[in-house]
Image: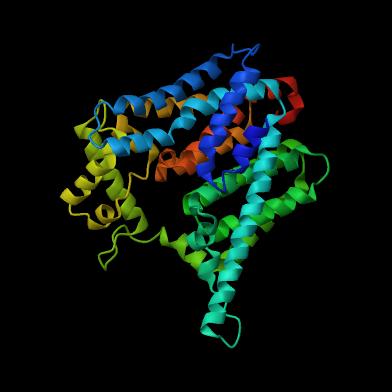
C-alpha cells in the first residue's frame, strides 16, 4: 500500500523513479499478497492479460525491427503494462481503502508540485528584473504559462494538466458526497482549475471543463445541492479572469481557431496534426498487419513526412500525436485492437459500477490520447496504468460500501 502511494505521488516529480518503485511494488505483492488472494474476477483477469499482451507485442517486435536500440528503448518504457495491473489488483483486494488514499497522496503531491512551479516562476521573474535592472517590477507572463511554468519540474504541460484534471474530478465528486461543505476541497478545486488555465493545454483543459460541468449538473440534481450553482458560475468567471490577465494563455486558447494553413506558410496547430495523422495513415496502409515495430516507427514516419515535403514535422521528428494510430502503425491491427480493448473494458467497468470518477477519468485520457501519443512516454504510461488499475480494481470497495461512490 505504501509502495503504491509513493509510486503515485512520484508521478508529477520524477517518472524515472517509477521503474524502481513499480518493480518494488510488484515484488512486495508477490511475496506478501499473492498467497490466499482471490483472482476470480473475470474482467480483472482480462485486463491483466490485455496489458501483458501489449507488453509482449513490444518483445515480439524486436524480432523484425531494424533499429534494435530504439526498440529496446521502447520496450524498457512499457514495463508498467506487465507489472502494474496485476500488482494493483492484489493491493486493492487486501486494502479496500486504497482508492481514496491513492487519490489523496496524488492530490498532495500535485499541490506541492504546482507550488514549486509557481515558486520557480517567481524566482526567474525576479532574476530577470534584477538582470535588466528594471526601475519597477516587470511581470513577465511567459514565466507563468505553458511550458515555462510546467518545465520547472520537468513535465510537459499537457500531462500535468491531465493529472490535475483527474484530481479535480475526484475532489468535485467527493464534495457532493459529503454532507457538509469541505472548504479544503473547494480551495483545492479553485487552485487547480486556475493552474490548469495558466498551463493552457487546450485538449485536456476543454475536456476537463466539460467533465466538471457534467459532474456538477449531475451532482446538483442527484444530491439536491442547489447552492452549488454559484460555484459553477464562479469557476467559469475565474477562468475568464485568468485568461484576461495572462494573454499568453489566452493566445493559446484562441490559436486553435487559426486556419489550417496560415498565409505565411507556417502550419497552424491543427494543420500539423492533420499532417501527422495523414502520414501515419500512409504508414498503416503499407504495413497493416504487423506494423513497422516501435523501433522503426519514427524513422518510417519521418521518411513519409520528407517524401511529402513536410519539413516542419520531419525536422522536429513529430510522432503521430494519436495513441491509437501510433499503436496501429507500430504493431498493425493487433496493437490497435489491444489498446481499444483495454479502453472498452475499462469504460464498461466504470459504467457497470456507476463510477462517476472512473468514467470521466477515462473520458479525459481517451480524448487526450486522440491528440497525443500518451502511451509512448513514461508520464502517460505509468499514470494510466496506475490510475486505471486503482479505479478498475476498486470494485470490492464499491460493492462492500454501497453508499461510497454509488
**Which residue does the image show at 50% across and 48% down from the upper left?**
159
- Asked if residue 197 lies left or right of residue 323, the reply is right
Q: Residue at x 73, y 54 (%)?
A: 187
Viewer-proximal residue among 183 and 9? 9
- Where's the C terminus, which quadrant? top right
Q: Can you tell which quarter of the image residue 396 is in?
A: top right
User: Is 340 drawn above or below residue 119 in the view shown?
Assistant: above
| Closer to us: 290 or 366 | 290
Residue 352 position within the rendered picture, expressed as x and y whole percent measured from the top left: 60, 23
Q: How is the image coloured?
A: rainbow
- Residue furthest to the bottom in view is 135
| x, y percent for residue 289 | 25, 25
Residue 180 higher or lower than 150, as above or below? above
Q: Is residue 246 above or below residue 222?
A: below
Q: Residue at x 29, y 51 (%)?
A: 317
325 over 50 or under it: above or below: below
Pick the front one: 214 or 80? 80
Q: Is residue 267 left or right of residue 227?
A: left
Q: Residue furthest right?
A: 180
Q: Position of residue 173 (x, y in %)?
A: 69, 40
- On the image, which quarter does residue 325 sit in? top left
- Front residue of 159 and 122: 122
Residue that appears at 40% across and 26% down: 54
Image quadrant assignment for residue 4: top right
Amino acid at each position: 500500500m505504501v509502495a503504491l502511494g509513493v509510486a503515485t505521488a512520484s508521478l508529477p516529480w520524477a517518472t524515472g523513479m517509477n521503474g524502481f518503485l513499480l518493480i518494488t511494488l510488484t515484488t512486495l505483492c508477490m511475496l506478501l499478497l499473492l498467497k490466499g488472494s482471490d483472482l476470480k474476477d473475470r474482467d480483472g483477469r482480462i485486463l491483466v492479460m490485455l496489458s501483458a499482451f501489449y507488453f509482449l507485442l513490444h518483445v515480439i517486435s524486436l524480432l523484425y525491427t531494424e533499429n534494435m536500440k530504439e526498440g529496446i528503448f521502447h520496450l524498457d518504457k512499457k514495463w508498467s503494462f506487465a507489472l502494474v495491473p496485476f500488482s494493483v489488483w492484489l493491493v486493492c483486494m487486501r486494502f479496500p481503502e486504497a482508492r481514496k488514499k491513492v487519490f489523496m497522496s496524488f492530490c498532495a503531491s500535485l499541490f506541492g508540485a504546482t507550488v514549486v512551479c509557481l515558486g520557480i516562476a517567481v524566482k526567474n521573474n525576479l532574476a530577470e528584473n534584477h538582470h535588466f535592472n528594471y526601475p519597477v517590477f516587470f511581470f513577465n507572463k511567459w514565466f507563468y504559462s505553458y511550458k515555462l511554468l510546467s518545465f520547472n519540474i520537468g513535465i510537459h504541460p499537457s500531462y500535468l494538466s491531465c493529472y490535475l484534471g483527474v484530481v479535480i474530478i475526484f475532489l468535485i465528486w467527493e464534495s457532493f458526497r459529503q454532507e457538509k461543505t469541505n472548504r479544503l476541497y473547494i480551495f483545492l478545486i479553485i487552485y487547480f482549475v486556475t493552474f490548469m488555465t495558466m498551463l493552457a493545454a487546450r485538449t485536456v483543459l476543454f475536456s476537463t471543463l466539460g467533465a466538471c460541468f457534467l459532474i456538477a449538473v449531475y451532482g446538483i440534481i442527484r444530491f439536491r445541492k442547489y447552492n452549488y450553482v454559484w460555484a459553477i458560475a464562479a469557476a467559469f468567471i475565474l477562468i475568464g479572469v485568468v485568461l484576461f490577465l495572462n494573454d499568453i494563455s489566452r493566445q493559446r486558447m484562441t490559436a486553435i481557431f487559426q486556419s489550417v494553413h496560415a498565409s505565411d506558410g507556417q502550419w497552424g496547430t491543427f494543420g500539423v496534426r492533420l499532417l501527422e495523422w495523414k502520414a501515419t495513415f500512409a504508414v498503416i496502409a503499407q504495413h497493416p498487419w504487423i506494423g513497422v515495430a516501435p523501433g522503426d516507427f519514427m524513422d518510417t514516419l519521418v521518411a513519409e513526412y520528407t517524401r511529402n515535403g513536410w519539413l516542419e514535422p520531419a525536422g522536429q521528428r513529430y510522432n503521430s500525436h494519436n495513441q491509437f494510430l501510433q499503436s496501429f502503425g507500430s504493431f498493425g491491427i493487433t496493437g490497435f485492437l489491444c489498446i481499444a480493448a483495454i479502453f472498452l473494458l475499462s469504460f464498461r467497468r466504470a459504467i457497470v459500477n456507476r463510477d462517476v470518477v472512473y468514467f470521466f477519468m477515462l473520458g479525459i485520457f481517451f480524448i487526450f490520447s486522440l491528440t497525443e501519443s500518451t502511451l509512448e512516454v513514461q508520464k502517460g504510461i505509468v499514470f494510466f496504468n496506475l490510475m486505471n488499475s486503482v479505479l478498475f480494481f476498486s470494485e470490492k470497495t464499491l460493492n462492500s460500501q454501497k453508499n461510497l461512490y454509488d
